[in-house]
């Protein structure tokens, strides 16, 4: 793909960043509401948004704190939820290899799902690292997420969340986040497997134990799903005749199209 001019790519980045910010603010408000139920203070909300800066892990932690889960369980679940960031770092490393260790460490703190997606697409368009582009991507999630969390906490304190039915916000938010991550049969198997394990365990041993069990065992169901035979066959054919015409029949693309 031809490389774009930096200014043109930044313009695309800004458009995408505004779209990210538009949903980060209301989702942050939902998080703020949940933290009130977990008896956080406003300072707790702001600090977790700025220091943890990991939506899925923060939602999970708030739910576990609400259920009075042990800190070891909370740490274990958040570690599992955030393990994907190792892959993000590996993918973006070729573009940041010439930056200083200190700068890379600081950048790593802001490497969320959204920052990764926006910045990597930008780097690929221009064929190199762009410091300003990276911080545009990071700002698109950091500021609206933090502000949204604080606004949600303050607004929730002014209403009776149980009377309005907002006490179900945590499970609903976690379900929505999980559905947004499902993109194939393996993801679906992992999600359904986690539910199948978590629900009965939660009924017997409590919600926090059920959540940990589902998070640990659920991915095993996804790993047990074998790659479709048609994808493997196409991979062999593409290996024998590697040219651009085979791009449309990439095994990865075919696997994604399969139901």
Image (spheres, rainbow, N blue to C red):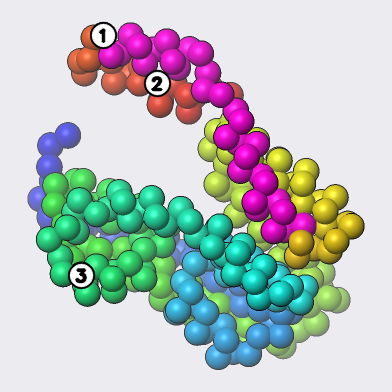
Looking at the image, which residue is at 77% across and 73% down? 67
Residue range in magenta is 210-239
Q: Position of residue 42 (x, y in %)?
A: 59, 89
Tag shown at residue 101? 3
Which residue is at 63% across, 90% downward?
41
Looking at the rendered image, the disc whose residue lies closer to the viewer, 2 or 1, is 1
Density class for disc 1 (Cα within 10 Å; few <14, some 14-19, many ≥20) is few
Q: State the residue at coordinates (70%, 51%).
A: 214
Residue 62 % position (x, y): 66, 73
**Mark found first going from the N terminus, 2 or 1:** 1
Question: In the picture provided, is 201 more to the left or to the right than 14?
Answer: right
Cβ atoms under marks 1 and 3 closer than 8 Å: no
Residue bearing the label numbered 1: 240
Secondary structure of the residue carrying tag 3 is: helix
Residue under circle 2? Answer: 251
> Which label belongs to residue 44?
none
Label 2, label 1: how many angstroms apart (C-alpha)?
A: 14 Å
Whether residue 75 appears in magenta in the rendering, the answer is: no
């Amino acid at each position: 793909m031809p490389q774009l001019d930096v200014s043109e790519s930044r313009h695309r980045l800004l458009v995408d960043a505004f779209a990210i910010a538009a949903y980060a603010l209301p989702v942050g408000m939902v998080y703020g509401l949940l933290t009130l139920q977990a008896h956080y203070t406003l300072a707790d909300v702001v600090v977790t948004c700025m220091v943890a800066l990991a939506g899925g892990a923060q939602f999970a932690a708030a739910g576990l704190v609400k259920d009075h889960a042990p800190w070891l369980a909370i740490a274990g679940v958040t570690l599992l939820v955030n393990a994907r960031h190792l892959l993000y770092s590996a993918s973006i490393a070729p573009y940041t290899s010439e930056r200083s260790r200190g700068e890379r460490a600081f950048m790593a703190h802001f490497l969320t799902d959204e920052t990764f997606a926006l910045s990597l697409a930008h780097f690929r368009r221009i064929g190199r690292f762009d410091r300003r582009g990276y911080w545009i991507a990071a700002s698109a999630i950091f500021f609206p997420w933090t502000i949204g969390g604080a606004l949600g906490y303050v607004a929730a304190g002014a209403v009776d969340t149980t009377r309005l039915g907002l006490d179900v916000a945590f499970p609903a938010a976690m379900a929505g986040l999980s559905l947004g991550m499902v993109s194939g049969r393996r993801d679906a198997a992992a999600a359904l497997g986690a539910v199948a394990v978590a629900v009965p365990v939660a009924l017997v041993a409590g919600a926090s134990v059920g959540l940990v069990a589902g998070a640990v065992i659920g991915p095993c169901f996804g790993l047990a799903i074998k790659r479709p035979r048609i994808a493997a066959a196409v991979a062999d054919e593409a290996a024998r005749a590697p040219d651009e015409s085979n791009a449309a029949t990439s095994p990865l693309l075919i696997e994604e199209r399969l139901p």
